[in-house]
Image: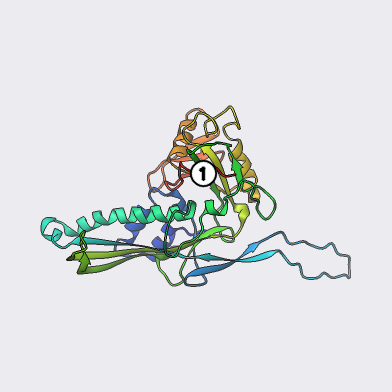
């Protein structure tokens, strides 16, 4: 019998429920090039369209006591919060005439559905990282949560760590320590596969490219999910990194030094970020790859189930997401 660990991710939950209808292939495709979607744990929300949680605003204070003496109840600085659940949907329409043209119509449908999986994954990762998803129900992103260079967590540690780059070619690296009561994703209670759905509508009337009516094969793809940041100590943004210049970037040794802001971010996290994962875009991923050739603190590891390379920065896995931009505004 399959069991779940402490942090069940999207693929874990899907495998446990043993679905049919190609949902495993759909989720494998959605997570293939988005490490942040592979790693995020998913839990059922306590409401249908949002999730109420409690943030720890400070440590509980104990009391030194004498024999035959008692203590009063200790109260932590607990702050309630609410995370919205975003509703992301896509619809596939294929002209039924293709059933006469394509020798294997089912395989053709599967190929045409693949861009929808990639699109949903890209937009969900966008919503998680930079918040570029527009319209409808959506939720605040990590970068929206850390939008000031002076922002601190509930224990006074800096959440933003600066490479001091300037210009219009800036990017960020995110450090996330996933887990319950820290940073995690939620989906509506009762939904299977962590809120991911594939609904086969069959042949029905639909709008063509010129808004004219046609009969086509229709399938709907849905993903209902929200991001919960319950502990600011488990989240960091290393930003103002120049993506194209020769200074103030990951490879730069002359200003901050190659690793200083990343190290500063990790050691400022809860438990010094021992289980935190770093996430970067194509540019920062490429710079880490280049650094793996000649730096002892960046290591290449064996392939994973997705057959994609992984790198380690001083014991912290460096994951990939295509949603982090190289055109960020400077954070001040």
- In this image, 97 relative to 149: left or right? left
51 or 160, nearer to the observer: 160
Q: Quadrant of the N terminus?
A: bottom left
**In x, y percent, where is residue 28?**
36, 54
Q: Residue at image x 60%, y 53%? A: 234
Does 306 appear above or below 6? Answer: above
Q: Quadrant of residue 56?
A: bottom right
Q: Is residue 103 left or right of residue 48?
A: left
Residue 137 shows in the view: yes
Residue at 89 percent of width and 70 percent of height: 68
Where residue 215 sits, quadrant-wise, is bottom left
Q: Is 248 situated above or below 117? A: above
Residue 247 higher or lower than 76, as above or below: above
- Which residue carries the number 1 mark? 329
* Residue appearing at x 30%, y 65% in the figure: 220
Residue 183 in picture, x, y percent from top left: 55, 57
Residue 294 left/right relative to 271? left
Residue 216 placement: quadrant? bottom left
In percent of width and height, residue 176 lies at 55, 50
């Amino acid at each position: 019998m399959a069991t779940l660990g402490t942090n069940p991710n999207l693929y874990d939950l899907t495998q446990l429920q043993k679905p049919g209808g190609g949902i495993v292939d759909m989720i494998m495709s959605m997570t293939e090039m988005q490490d942040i979607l592979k790693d995020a744990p998913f839990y059922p929300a306590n409401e249908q369209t949002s999730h109420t949680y409690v943030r720890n605003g400070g440590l509980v204070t104990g009391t030194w006591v004498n024999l035959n003496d008692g203590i009063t109840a200790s109260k932590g600085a607990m702050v309630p919060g609410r995370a919205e659940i975003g509703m992301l949907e896509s619809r596939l329409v294929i002209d039924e005439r293709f059933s006469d043209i394509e020798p294997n119509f089912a395989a053709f449908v599967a190929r045409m559905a693949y861009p929808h999986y990639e699109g949903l994954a890209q937009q969900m990762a966008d919503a998680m990282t930079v918040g570029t998803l527009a319209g409808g129900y959506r939720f605040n992103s990590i970068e929206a949560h850390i939008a000031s260079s002076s922002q601190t967590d509930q224990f006074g540690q800096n959440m933003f760590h600066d490479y001091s780059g300037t210009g219009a070619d800036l990017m960020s690296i995110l450090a996330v320590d996933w887990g319950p009561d820290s940073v995690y994703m939620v989906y509506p209670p009762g939904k299977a596969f962590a809120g991911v759905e594939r609904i086969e509508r069959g042949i029905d009337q639909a709008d063509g490219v010129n808004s004219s009516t046609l009969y086509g094969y229709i399938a709907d793809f849905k993903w209902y999910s929200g991001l919960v940041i319950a502990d600011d100590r488990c989240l960091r943004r290393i930003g103002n990194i120049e993506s194209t210049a020769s200074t103030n970037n990951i490879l730069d040794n002359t200003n901050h030094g190659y690793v200083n802001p990343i190290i500063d971010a990790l050691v400022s996290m809860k438990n010094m970020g021992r289980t935190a994962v770093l996430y970067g875009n194509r540019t920062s991923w490429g710079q880490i790859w280049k650094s793996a050739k000649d730096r002892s603190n960046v290591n290449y590891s064996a392939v994973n189930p997705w057959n994609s390379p992984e790198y380690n920065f001083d014991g912290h896995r460096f994951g990939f997401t295509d949603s982090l931009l190289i055109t960020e505004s400077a954070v001040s």
